[in-house]
Amino acid sequence: MATAAVATKTAWKLQEITAHSSSVSSLVLGKSSGRLLATGGEDCRVNIWSVNKPNCIMSLTGHTTPVESVKINTNEELIVAGSQSGSIRIWDLEAAKILRTLMGHKANICSLDFHPFGGFVASGSMDTNIKVRPSLPFIYGHESAVRCLRFSPDGKWLASSSDDHTVKLWDLAAGKIMFEFAGHTGPVNMVEFHPNEYLLASGSSDRMIRFWDLEKFQVVSCIEEEATPARCVLFNPDGCCLFAGCQDALRVYGWEPERCFDVVPVSWSKVADLSICNNQLIGVSFSQSVVSSFVVDLNRVTRSGSGLQGLIRDDRPPAQQLPPTGSSLRRIYERPSTACSKPQRRSPSSEDDREEKESTAEIQNPEDYQEIFQPKNSITRTPPHKSENPYAPGMGVDSPFAGIARGEPEPVQRPPLASSTPLARTEPSAVIPAARNEPIGLKASDFLPAVKNQSLAEIVDEEAVSQIRKGHDTMCVVLTSRHKNLDTVRAVWNTGDIKTSVDSAVAINDLSVVVDLLNIVNQKASLWKLDLCTVILPQIEKLLQSKYESYVQTGCTSLKLILQRFLPLITDILAAPPSVGVDISREERLHKCRLCYKQLKNISNVIKNKSGLSGRHGSAFRELHLLMAVLE
């Protein structure tokens, strides 16, 4: 009887798998579906699994040292892995190929996180540095190893925790620290943003979980673990409570006032990550090469109320204590209406790209790969309906999930789950889309004679042809002129002088020719030079303000390449002390940097004004605004 009573609340062990040929060093769950699991091992591989299925779906290779940190993005389309040597690799899971290799850290990668809306990846290392790539022009850091990184739900802030006992909050747009939270007496191993409110939770080896108010920058409450420190934390999707994965149990906490709502005994030892799917909490743990997964039925877990007897650490009588959520006490995040963008793949031109070629994605289970990563199939990563429990097969009637498997209604309503497919956004009406079914500014009706009653009139063939031929000669002149201009630019291009060919395109004073040329230059980043930027930047400013979507897209791509390759160089040269003596080459380079800086400042005003747009344009402009934050 005692065993049966415990079984109604303890975690149900789903499976145990041998994940690697050597010890597992890191693992992470996909947060949107709870069905995707990634493991990193000392065998230098990253293996992808479907929870509750025994076979590996995909094995990613390329790292030459043990993989010590992995992270899956919000849409579960990308995965990033950091190694002991400090290298980072990003893979596209749907395309089964590597996208980028990032270098720069000098020691082990301890933590990674994807930006919720843009194509940025944050990395923290044992070298005490934090980098946000691709190429944000500033580096954050701590005094000791950086253990955890988290972007805020609105994508504006980055929280970091470290072995130096501190938690830091960084403003990405301003490129500087907002506040340093002190109070922990041991290494801070984890941070987690509240899904809605300006609230941050941090867990430390000192066995304390602290809640920080991000408006007043002060501690809200502190909870002391009874025996062992929490190994991972996760807020409930509606923000009503915090789940803490400890070595011996799952604990459910409230913070205003601090209290423990429930304790679920779990023997998962080194629990590494938590995820919530279909009102079930999934937890994964590892020991040597074995990974175990567990499920807790949240319908049987108390997530609100007065807390367990004796665990309320508050001097006020229970009748005067505040409600557990505190939803009316703090500001709510304002999330931009935009979808995640994938990091762009670079053209092969460096040693990093040679390493990318050596990285592979071995699909070991094609059936599961098609089911998980092909969104056109009927089965997707989106969790099943609440009456379709994905973990029901093989469970007996005594299982705490038996009722769910039989389709019994759930007493607790869950918030709607976001689909992994982004919603279509309407572009501003002033922008002419790149994909059209008819020429720009031309309508078929304009070529037909105007009649009062079109349905009753008979159009003579000769009259129709006459109308169609109107303006034909003019159009031929325009197209012939453009063809001649492109031939001129191409002739200069064939001499190998890229700068002169760009000068000739700009001198023609036709943006369409500039766009055609930039679409070629953008495909090979190695063609970009500093003197080329001085000529292109004024043209980019014009393209960004064009009414044609294709012009805006080309301008954004070119500007992003310039910012990633040259902005750190420009800021470093301008900040360097003046040289002693005469250095003509340095003076020329300094002059080019000043000119580029002035042009970038002008463009930054355009970017700032357009960053409030919705859809693809807004997403691109917001990403550029972050890259240009150092100019403000």
Image (cartoon, grey):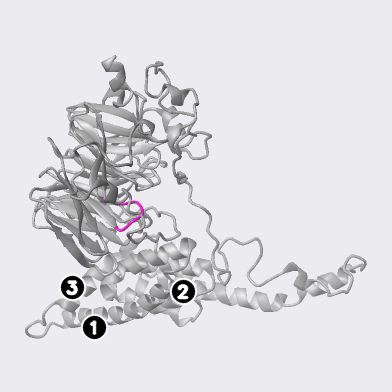
Residue 33: x %, y % from top left: 40, 38
- Residue 432 in which image quadrant: bottom right
Q: Provide the residue designation for mark 2.
A: 543
Q: In this view, does 358 lie to the left or right of 492?
A: left
Image: magenta residue range: 192-198
Q: How crowded is mark 2: few (under 14 residues within 10 Å), some or many (20 or more)?
A: many
For badge 3, the amino acid type reads Asp
Q: In this view, does 217 lie to the left or right of 405?
A: left
Q: Looking at the picture, does residue 216 appear above or below residue 403?
A: below
Q: Determine the CA span between mark 3 and mark 1.
A: 13 Å
Residue 572: mark = 3
Report the quarter where the N terminus lies. Answer: top left
Cα distance, mark 3 to mark 2?
Answer: 28 Å
First in residue order: circle 1 vs circle 2: 2
Q: Mark 1 or mark 2: which is in front?
A: 2
Name the amino acid, label 2: Leu
Q: What element carries label 2?
A: helix
Residue that lies at the very extreme toward the top in this rendered image: 1
Out of 620 and 564, give the one closest to the viewer.
620
Find residue 436 and report its horizontal and vertical position in percent.
Answer: 62, 62
